[in-house]
């Protein structure tokens, strides 16, 4: 019986130490879901939108989260017309993204049958190396 109590105390202590370690590293995750996507953010989520595009052809919703370790942004765009379901569309957005430094990686693939173009940008801002995935 003492062995079980000691083992339980050890697991409880490890659990508490793990909780303290996570709190000290600032690791806090915030699951977030809508009817259109789900994601885990590194902190609280701020929602902006709906915002109409300048050309009045789409509506954006922007989901922002910022912590001491990361800044995250997801933009969900509803387009008012049909667009091609191929790499033409995903390339359009990847090529249109000129903010965020030099592209260090670019790839194309399919996710759940949907084509995507992925880019990774690298830059240095105020002496801090940063990367952006699009």
Image: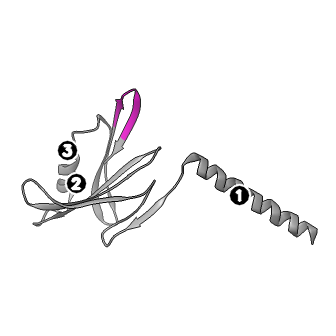
Residue at 13 percent across and 61 percent down: it is: 58
Q: Is residue 128 magenta?
A: yes
Above or below, 37 against 128 in this view is below
User: In the image, which disc is placed on residue 16?
Assistant: 1
Q: Is residue 97 magenta?
A: no
Q: CA distance from mark 2 to mark 1?
A: 45 Å
Q: Quadrant of the N terminus?
A: bottom right
> With 70 as the anchor, is 125 left or right in this view?
left
Q: What residue sits right under mark 2 in the picture?
A: 90
Please state the horizontal and vertical placement of residue 116, each as a whole percent of the image: 28, 56
Range of the magenta residues?
A: 122-131
Graded by Cα atoms within 10 Å as few (under 14), some (14 to 19) or many (20 or more), the crowding at tag 3 reads few
Residue at 81 percent across and 66 percent down: it is: 8
Q: CA distance from mark 2 to mark 3?
A: 9 Å
> With 129 as the anchor, is 106 left or right in this view?
left
User: SS of the residue at dot 3?
Assistant: helix
Q: CA distance from mark 1 to mark 3?
A: 48 Å
Mark nearer the N terminus (2 vs 1): 1
User: SS of the residue at dot 2?
Assistant: helix
Mark nearer the N terminus (2 vs 3): 2
Residue at 54 percent across and 51 percent down: it is: 27
Please state the horizontal and vertical placement of residue 97, each as a whole percent of the image: 22, 44
Front disc: 2 or 1: 1
Please state the horizontal and vertical placement of residue 53, each as a whole percent of the image: 12, 56
User: In the image, which disc is placed on residue 95?
Assistant: 3
The secondary structure making up most of the magenta span is strand
Above or below, 81 against 105 in this view is below
């Amino acid at each position: 019986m003492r062995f079980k109590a000691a083992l339980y105390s050890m697991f409880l202590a490890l659990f508490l130490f793990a909780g303290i370690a996570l709190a000290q590293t600032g690791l806090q995750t915030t699951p977030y879901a809508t009817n259109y996507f789900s994601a885990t953010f590194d902190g609280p989520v701020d929602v902006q939108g709906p915002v109409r595009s300048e050309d009045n052809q789409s509506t954006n919703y922007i989901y922002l989260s910022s912590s001491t370790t990361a800044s995250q942004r997801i933009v969900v765009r509803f387009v008012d017309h049909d667009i091609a379901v191929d790499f033409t569309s995903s390339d359009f957005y990847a090529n249109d993204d000129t903010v965020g430094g030099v592209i260090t990686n670019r790839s194309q693939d399919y996710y759940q049958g949907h084509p995507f173009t992925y880019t990774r940008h690298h830059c240095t801002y105020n002496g801090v190396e940063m990367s952006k995935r699009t």
